[in-house]
Image (cartoon, rainbow, N blue to C red):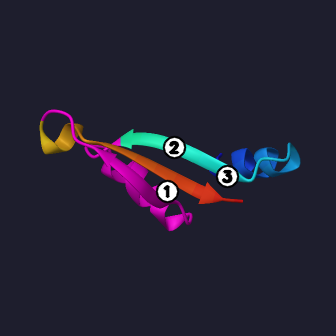
Amino acid sequence: MLAEQERWARSQGYQQLWVKTRNQFRAMLIMLISHEYQIFTLEKKGEVDEYRLLLKKNL
């Protein structure tokens, strides 16, 4: 599904994709990093598990 989203975004002229997730979603973070997304910012809110991460990928 992620590959299809990236294909569609490229076909629509997008140059970057952004994803915001939380530190507690380990599987999501691993998947995004393994697909060449990079951590752009970290927003500290509450406990460490609740920290928000903004990741981006250049297409």
User: Residue 36: horizontal and vertical position, in percent?
Assistant: 55, 66
* Residue at 74% over, 53% down: 15
Using the image as rendered, state which of residue 48 and residue 44 is in the foreground. Answer: 44
Q: Secondary structure at mark 2?
A: strand
User: Residue 52: horizontal and vertical position, in percent?
Assistant: 32, 40
Assign the C terminus to one quadrant of the image.
Answer: bottom right
Using the image as rendered, state which of residue 4 and residue 38 is in the foreground. Answer: 38
Q: Which residue is mark 1?
A: 32
Between circles 2 and 3, the one closer to the viewer is 3
* Residue at 22% over, 37% down: 50
Q: Which residue is mark 3?
A: 16
- The numbered mark at residue 2 is none
Between circles 2 and 1, the one closer to the viewer is 2
| Type of the residue with mark 2 | Val
In this image, 9 relative to 50: left or right? Answer: right
Q: Which residue is mark 2?
A: 19
Using the image as rendered, state which of residue 24 and residue 38 is in the foreground. Answer: 38
Label 3 with label 1: CB-CB less than 8 Å = no
Highlighted range, magenta: 22-46
Q: Earlier in the sequence, mark 3 or mark 1?
A: 3
User: Residue 26: horizontal and vertical position, in percent?
Assistant: 31, 51
Using the image as rendered, state which of residue 32 and residue 38 is in the foreground. Answer: 38
Q: Secondary structure at mark 1?
A: helix
The CA distance from mark 2 to mark 3 is: 10 Å
